[in-house]
Image (cartoon, helix red, strand yellow):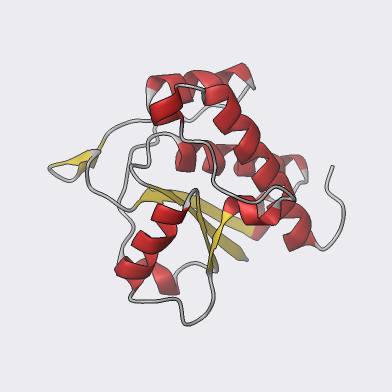
Amino acid sequence: MIRIMFVCHGNICRSPMAEFIFRDMVKKQGLEKEFTISSSATSTEEIWNGIGNPVYPPAKAELAKHGLSCDGKRAVQLKKSDYEKYDYFMGMDSANIRNMMRIFGGDGDNKISKLMDYTDRGGDVADPWYSRRFDIAYRDIYDGCEALLKKLLGHEYG
């Protein structure tokens, strides 16, 4: 079982998009039983009285354009205890990496990386919260997820 947690600041845009894009890729390979796939936030900004906000409507709409549903997903915060529960933590940008390191108190098992580091481009996933370009964020996330899956499967995906 490969356990992956996608992480962004609020868990309402990029990390849930990554969760559902990656789930779809894994499903198309017939490997759903081989993976646990989740997403979470480094902040509590989108969580009120213990209840997380749903996926931001423009992010949900971008997923729907590609035939993906994120119905029922609500923001959750990353916890220190998650470190032992997952094999990989995929941050969307450098700030997410810093915040994960703070939450976990380091990365002794080398589980934390940026999603885009698996691509030839590297860098951060474009943040649609500021740019409003959910299409560009989708493209970055899709490319990152595709490259991650190739690496995990040890062969060409697709």
Rendering coords of residue 40 (x, y %)? 39, 50
Q: In this view of the protein, can residue 108 be seen by the observer?
A: yes
The image shows residue 16, relative to residue 93, as above or below, that is above
24 and 132: which is toward the camera: 132
Q: What residue appears at the point 46 percent right and 55 percent down from the top-left corner?
A: 94
Q: What residue appears at the point 78 percent right and 54 percent down from the top-left corner?
A: 150
| Quadrant in the picture for the C terminus | top right
Q: In this view of the protein, can residue 63 be seen by the observer?
A: no
Q: What residue appears at the point 33 percent right and 76 percent down from the top-left corner?
A: 105
Rendering coords of residue 23 (x, y %)? 61, 43
| Quadrant in the picture for the N terminus | bottom right
In-image side of 96 versus 17 (left or right): left
The image shows residue 129, relative to residue 28, as above or below, that is above
In which quarter of the view is residue 84 placed?
bottom left
In which quarter of the view is residue 55 placed?
top left
In which quarter of the view is residue 139 placed?
top right
